[in-house]
Amino acid sequence: MLTAPLSRPSGLSCRQGRKGEVHLQPGLLGSQAQEVQTRWRPSPCFGAGKRSPTKMIHSLFLINCSGDIFLEKHWKSVVSQSVCDYFFEAQEKAADVENVPPVISTPHHYLISIHRDRLFFVSVIQTEVPPLFVIEFLHRVADTFQDYFGECSEAAIKDNVVIVYELLEEMLDNGFPLATESNILKELIKPPTILRSVVNSITGSSNVGDTLPTGQLSNIPWRRAGVKYTNNEAYFDVVEEIDAIIDKSGSTVFAEIQGVIDACIKLSGMPDLSLSFMNPRLLDDVSFHPCIRFKRWESERVLSFIPPDGNFRLISYRVSSQNLVAIPVYVKHSISFKENSSCGRFDITIGPKQNMGKTIEGITVTVHMPKVVLNMNLTPTQGSYTFDPVTKVLTWDVGKITPQKLPSLKGLVNLQSGAPKPEENPSLNIQFKIQQLAISGLKVNRLDMYGEKYKPFKGVKYVTKAGKFQVRT
Amino acid sequence: MTDSKYFTTTKKGEIFELKAELNSDKKEKKKEAVKKVIASMTVGKDVSALFPDVVNCMQTDNLELKKLVYLYLMNYAKSQPDMAIMAVNTFVKDCEDPNPLIRALAVRTMGCIRVDKITEYLCEPLRKCLKDEDPYVRKTAAVCVAKLHDINAQLVEDQGFLDTLKDLISDSNPMVVANAVAALSEIAESHPSSNLLDLNPQSINKLLTALNECTEWGQIFILDCLANYTPKDDREAQSICERVTPRLSHANSAVVLSAVKVLMKFMEMLSKDLDYYGTLLKKLAPPLVTLLSAEPELQYVALRNINLIVQKRPEILKHEMKVFFVKYNDPIYVKLEKLDIMIRLASQANIAQVLAELKEYATEVDVDFVRKAVRAIGRCAIKVEQSAERCVSTLLDLIQTKVNYVVQEAIVVIKDIFRKYPNKYESVIATLCENLDSLDEPEARAAMIWIVGEYAERIDNADELLESFLEGFHDESTQVQLQLLTAIVKLFLKKPTETQELVQQVLSLATQDSDNPDLRDRGYIYWRLLSTDPVAAKEVVLAEKPLISEETDLIEPTLLDELICYIGTLASVYHKPPSAFVEGGRGVVHKSLPPRTASSESTESPETAPAGAPSSEQPDVIPTQGDLLGDLLNLDLGPPVSGPPLATSSVQMGAVDLLGGGLDSLMGDEPEGIGGPNFVAPPAAAVPANLGASMGSGLSDLFDLTSGVGTLSGSYVAPKAVWLPAMKAKGLEISGTFTRQVGSISMDLQLTNKALQVMTDFAIQFNRNSFGLAPAAPLQVHAPLSPNQTVEISLPLNTVGSVMKMEPLNNLQVAVKNNIDVFYFSTLYPLHILFVEDGKMDRQMFLATWKDIPNENEAQFQIRDCPLNAEAVSSRLQSSNIFTVAKRNVEGQDMLYQSLKLTNGIWVLAELRIQPGNPSFTLSLKCRAPEVSQHVYQAYETILKN
C-alpha cells in the first residue's frame, strides 16, 4: 500500500531582527509571503515603540549623476546617508537613469525622487503621504534653484550652499511647505548676483532680507507690495507644443497640443489685469496659476488676475480633439535592411504640411538606430548630420524648410556582419519651431488693466514647437 | 567668491580651527566660521561638537548671523536636546523682538527642541505668537503647535492651544489658514480618537471657504480632510462637489488629485440619473488626462491612480484611449502602467486601434515591455470576443518573427485563448509546434505541453513531442514536470494503445525518482486512478473545464472601494490598503465609500445596486488560487476561473476529502461517486470541514472551561475579542482571548474564513515582547478552512521567548500567515495570565520586602463599584493566583495584604483596603519594577468585576 506524504512543512521559523521586526524566514513560506518581506516589510514602525507622526518630508538628499550625495538636509532628525543605498540599488537595476522608479520602499522609509537636470532629488518619507505632494514640492525646489542661480546644477548648488540651506529651511517647516512662491522667497532671501556679492564683501552687508515679505500680509501672497518700475511692461508668450505619433503610412495615431501662456509682468503698484481671447472656447482643459479668478473664467471666459511680479506661468492648457491639431510637417521615409547582408538603405525627406503659410525652422531629426548598426554613410541635401556609434544616435540638424527644395538625407547603413537584421525600424524624433503662430488658432483679443493710472507697454508673442513628435517607420 | 570655499579642509583638526574662529572677536570671522559649519553640515559631516560655540554666537543683532545659528540649531536640536536648553533664554527673548522675522524664527526653532523640561517655558511665547499681529509669525506658530503636540500632547490640550488653532482656520491670511489646517490634520492623524477635526456641516463650510483662500499646499490638506467626511445626503454631497470642482483646474497636480479623490468618493452618493452626475463625470476626464503631460514622476503616480479610477468608473475615460498610447521615450515605469490601462479601456469600439498599437510595441527594444505587450494582445482577445481572430493572427505574425522571447510569450497567451474559445483556433497548433525547440522558459514550455496534451487526439505525433520533453524530465522546473505528467496521462487516456509505455515511464519518474511531494502525490493519484478505474480516470482527467473569465488582474471590489478613498496616497501607488504597510491600530482608520443615501425627493430606481455592494456591471472577481483538484484537472490557474464560486469551493473540499478520507475509498466499490468535478455531494463536503474544526479544538476542549466555570478552576478569562478584522486580512477574521489553566498559558483563537476561497497553511509567530511570550507549539489547523467556516484553536504559550520591552507593556504583536498572505495585528494581553501559582509570599518575607521597596515605587489606585466583601475578594483573586498573605481589620476597614509573582520572577505586593458598605476599594501596589503596577491594577479590576 502506498502512502504518499500529505502534509507540507507548514512551520514557521522565526528570527528576531533589529528593531524588533518580525522576520519571516523565506523558503518556508509561500512566494506571497516573500513578496511581503521584500516589498512589504510590515511597516517602518512595526515594533519600533513610540512613533513620532512625521508627516511629510523628513529629509532630502541631492545626488549627482555619478552617484555622489553632495547635499543633505534634514527637517526632522538626521537620517543616515545609508538610506540612499536602496536608491542606488534601484538605479543599478534600472540601467538607464530615466527609468529609476520614482517611489521606492525601504524597510523603514519611503524614497520619493525626481530626476532634474542630471541631478536626483531624493526625499525620505516615513509615513503615508501623498506622493504627488512630494514630487510637486521637489520640482518646486528645483525650479527655485533654477530661478536663483540661473541653473540647477551641482556646481551652482555647491557655490551657494548657504543660500540653498536657507531656502530649504524657508520652503519647508516641520515637513509642511511654507513659502514656495518665488516672489516671496526672493524677499526673504536675496538671490546672489555678482554685484551684490562684491558689495557684500566690501560693506559686510548680507543677503538675508531683514524685513518681512510684504505679500505675506495681504491676501495676495504671490505679489509683493510697493513694486515700482519706470517702464511698465506686460508681455505674454503663447507657446504651443505638438505631441504626436505618426504611423508608417503617415496617418496620425495620436496628436495633441500642450499650450502654456507665460507672462513677464513688470508693472508698478497693484495692477488688476483682464486678458481675453478671440476664441476662448478652444480652452476647455486648463490649469491656472492661483492668481486667476476662477469664477470670472467660468462665467465670462476672461482671465482676470492680479499678477505676481516678474516671470510666471499664467495658464497651461491642452487641446486634444484630433481635428483641431494640425500637423505641420510630413516625412517620407524608406529605411531597409537586407537579409544576410551587412548593409541597409536609409532615405528620409521632410516637407511642410499644414504650416499656415509660416516658415518651419529649427528642424532636427533624431533617430535611435538599432544596436547592430555600426556606422552610417549619408548625404544631406542641407544641414549636417552626426552619428554616434556608441549610443547609436543619428542627429540631423536640418535648419528650415524651403518648399522649392525639400531637405533629404540618404545613404548607406553599415551593419555588424553576421548579426541578424534588425526586427524593427527605428522611430524618428522630430523637433521644429514655427514663429508667430499658435497652431491651435488661439488668439489673444485684448489686455485691460484696472487699478493703476499709467499706460503699460503690452505685447503677445506666439510660437509653436514640436513636443514629443514621433514618426514611426 | 562663492560658498565652495567653505568646503576646503585645513590640515589641522578642522573642528579645532572652527572652534577658534567661532570664538573670535571679529564679527565677520564669526559669520564666516558659522557658514563653514553649515557647509560641513550639508554634506553630512557631524559638527555637533561645536554646539556650545555656535550657540554663543546667537546673541547678535546681525540678522544673517542669527539666521545661520538658528539653521544650525534646527539641525542639531533634536539630537542634542540637553545642550539646546542653553538657548532657551534667547528664544524667549527673541519671541519679543520687534522684528517679526526674528519672532517667527525663534518660535519655529523652539518647536524643534524635543525636551520635555523646556516645553513649559515655551507655552507663553507660543501663546503670544499665535495671536501675533503679523501673519508670518502666526503661521509659523501654528506649525509649532503641531510640533509641541508631538512632544507633549497633554500640555497642548491643557493650554488650550488646540482651540486657538481651530480659530486660525478662519484667519484672514491664506498662509495662516493653510498651516493651521496642516497642523490640525497632523495632530488628528496621530491621535485618531481626538475628534479634533470633527467634521460637521459647519466646520465643512469653514473648510470650504478656507479652500478658496489658502495656498496650494493648504488646499491639499483641506481636500484630504474633506475626503474623510461623509455627507448626510446626496444634496450635501453635490454641494460640496460643486465647490470642489474648480480645484480640478489647479496647476498643482497634487491639488488636482486630492480634488479627484473627494469627487470620486462623494459621487458614490449621487444618483446616476442626476444630471449633475453626468456633468461631474465629464469634468473629471480632462484634469486626469492633463496629469499625463506632466513630468514622468508625476505621470507615474497619476497612472497608478487612474488605474484605480478606470476600474471603479470606466465611463470617465472611455473616450481617452489615445492619451495612453506609449511614446518610445517614455520611462519604462510609465510605459508599463500605460499598457495596463490600455487593456482595461479596450472595448469593441477601439480594439482595432489598440491592437495596431500593441503590435507596434511588440517590436520595441525593451524586453519587459515587449513581453507585456504580447501578453496584452492575448488579454484583448479574451476580453473582446470580436477581436479574438485578429489577435490570434497578430500573435501568429509575431511568432513568425522568431524573436525568442516574443515567441514564448505568444505561446503562453495563445494557451489562454484556447481556454476561452475552445475548438476555434486549433488550426494554429501546427505553427506552434514548429517552435517547440526554441522554448526555454518554464512557463512557455508548460503552456506548450498543455496544448499538446489537451489536443493530443489532433496531433499525430503528440507522443513523440511529449517524449522529447521527457528525456530531461529531472532538469525541468516543477511547473513543467507537473504539466508533462498530466499531459501524458491525457494522451494515454485518448490514445491508450500506443502510449502505455510512455505513461509508465512518466509515472515512475514522478513517483519514484522525484523529491517533490506535489509531483509524487499527483503521480500516485493518477496511478491509482488509472489502475483502478480507467473510465473514472477519464471522466476526472478529461472533464470539461470551465471557461476563463474576461477580466484578469482586477482588484477585489471591497479593496478597490477602500483604495478609492486613498487616491493620491502611497496606498494608491502600491494598490494595497495602508493597513498592509502602516502599523495597524494607531493612525490607520479604515475608510470606506459612503453609502448612497438619497434625500427624500430623489427617486432611485430599485435596480440600482444597494450601497456598498458591487454594482451590477462590475465583473465578478474570483480569486486565483492553486487548489488541489484544480491542479488535478490541470485547470491552469493563471487566469481566474469563471463559474459560480460556490461550486468551486465545494470541489475544493472534495479534493480534501479525497486525500483526508484515505485513498482507499477511491478503490472502494463506489466508482460512480467519483465521476467528475460534481462528484461531491454537499453533506460529504461538510464532513471533513467539521472534522478539522473539532480536531483543532479537541485538545483545548479537555481543559477549556471557558464557559462560566473559568473563575473557579483557573484565572479569569475574558470573552473573545476581534483582533484582526476580515477587512484587513483578505477575509481572515481572528478573534481570541488568553487563558491560564493550572500553570499553562494559552491563547484561544477563533479563525473565521470570510473570503471566497479556502485557506490553508496557517502559521503564527509573535514579535519579541515584554515577558517573552511565545507559542509553545505550532498553530495546528488540521483541515483547510473553507469559506464561512470557523475553527477554534487553543495555542499553548510559554514565556521563554526573547524579551523586548513594549509600549504598552502588555502589547503583543502577532503575525499570522496563511496561503494567501501574511497579516499582522497587535493585541493587549491581561497581565494576570502571567501570575504564577507559587506567588504566595511568606509573611515575614512580605513585611521585609514591603519595607525594602522604596516609597516612590508605591502606586495607589481606586477600584470602584465592586460589591464583594473581603472574603469573596480574597477567594476570587486567589483563583487568579493573587494570594492573600495576611488580613487585618483596622478601624472597621478590612486590609488585605497580597502577593503575586510574574512569570519572569517579579514580585508585586499589594495592600487592598475594603470598607464595608463602600463599593470603592483602595489598592496600593509596591514593586521593584513600578511600570507593571498599572497593569496589575487593571488585572485586579478585570478579575474583581467579572
Image: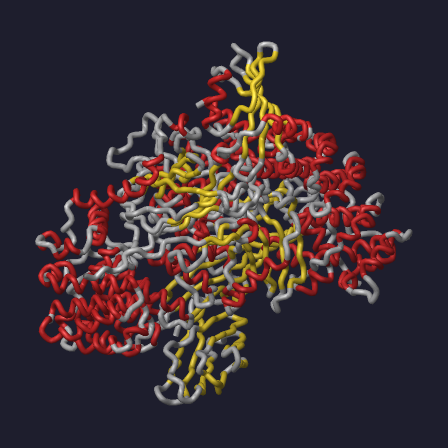
Q: Name the quarter where the C terminus of chain A is drawn.
A: bottom left
Q: Position of residue B144 (x, y in %)?
A: 67, 38
For the image shown, how many numbered marks are present on the structure? 0
Q: Nearer the viewer, residue A432 or B117?
A: B117
Say whether residue B409 is visible: yes
Which residue sits at x=35%, y=34%? B704
Q: Nearer the viewer, residue A200 or B543?
A: B543
Which residue sits at x=43%, y=40%? B263
Instruction: Establish if B458 lies above or below B805.
Output: below
Q: Position of residue B358 (x, y in %)?
A: 34, 66
Instruction: Establish if B253 lies above or below B390.
Output: above
Say whether residue A441 is visible: no
Q: Nearer the viewer, residue A67 or B698?
A: B698
Q: Name the quarter where the N terminus of chain A is drawn.
A: bottom left
Instruction: Establish if A188 lies above or below B707.
Output: below
Residue B937: which quarter of the image?
top right
Q: Position of residue A192 (x, y in %)?
A: 75, 57
Q: Position of residue A393 (x, y in %)?
A: 50, 77
